[in-house]
Image: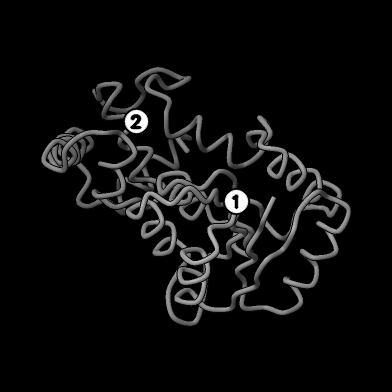
């Protein structure tokens, strides 16, 4: 498997080299900016891109979006310092195949990389898999609590609580932007919330995310 490691921290790039040393992979390039990453992926067509989400010139989600628009065959696994729920959700929506926090124990991180390089999906107990399930779930475990919302509205509310934009919700749920806006207005009305921030707080209190 041919891999590009995209991270602006040299220590991380060296660490990845060590972790991958005994796996059947070939690190064909290392990049330190977003624009360089896009150029290298385009010219080298790696099997896998290990991607951080922060770069001096752009964020990793812009890279994921561009690769998606280009229909790039390169698989992407995010390997990031940041363990924010919004980042994990965005990585799922924009086509990443896994999200690996750098704070993971070394053994777990190596196991995750081994799974990925073997073409296996993220571990069912991983953060990535749990958020995939959360975004896809239509029916809430506890039923309809606290407001007379439909199951679709509860699903959309979880997306809002994760800090996702209307455009990202459209991509995630496969519905039009007009439908998303209509659902948001219905949720605001039914919950008597003043804005999306208040909705996110309410959804968190209701343990929807």
Identify which residue is drawn at 11% across, 41% down: 178
What residue occupies the far bottom of the structure in this picture? 56
Q: Nearer the viewer, residue 49 or 134?
A: 49
Q: Residues within 10 Å of mark 2 (few under 14, many from 20)?
A: many
Tag 2 secondary structure: helix
List the residue tagged with mark 1. 47
In the image as oriented, which residue stretches furthest toward the front? Answer: 43
Between the residue at mark 1 and the residue at mark 2, the CA separation in whole angstroms equals 33 Å
Residue 184 locus on image (x, y percent): 19, 41
Q: Would residue 69 be found to the left or right of residue 6 on screen?
A: left
Q: Under tag 1, what secondary structure?
A: loop
Q: Residues within 10 Å of mark 1 (few under 14, many from 20)?
A: some
Q: Residue at x 65, y 70 (%)?
A: 29
Q: Which mark is residue 155?
A: 2
- The answer to whether residue 19 is above or below residue 157 is below
Q: Is residue 182 above or below residue 99?
A: above
């Amino acid at each position: 498997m041919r891999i590009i490691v995209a991270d602006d921290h040299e220590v991380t790039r060296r660490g990845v080299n060590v972790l991958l040393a005994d796996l059947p992979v070939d690190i064909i390039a290392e990049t330190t900016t977003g624009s360089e990453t896009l150029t290298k992926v385009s010219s080298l067509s790696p099997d896998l891109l290990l991607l951080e989400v922060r770069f001096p010139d752009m964020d990793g989600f812009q890279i994921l979006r561009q690769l998606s628009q280009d229909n790039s065959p390169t698989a992407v696994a995010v390997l990031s310092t940041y363990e924010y729920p919004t980042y994990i959700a965005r990585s799922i929506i924009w086509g990443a195949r896994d999200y690996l926090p750098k704070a993971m124990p070394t053994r777990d991180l190596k196991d995750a990389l081994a799974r990925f390089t073997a073409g296996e999906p993220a571990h069912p107990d991983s953060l990535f898999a749990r958020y995939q399930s959360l975004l896809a779930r239509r029916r809430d475990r506890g039923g309809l609590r606290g407001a007379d919302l439909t199951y679709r509205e509860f699903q959309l509310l979880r997306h809002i609580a994760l800090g996702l934009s209307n455009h990202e919700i459209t991509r995630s749920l496969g519905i039009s932007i007009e439908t998303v806006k209509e659902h948001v207005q219905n949720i605001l009305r039914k919950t008597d919330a003043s804005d999306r921030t208040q909705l996110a707080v309410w959804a968190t209190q209701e343990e929807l995310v």
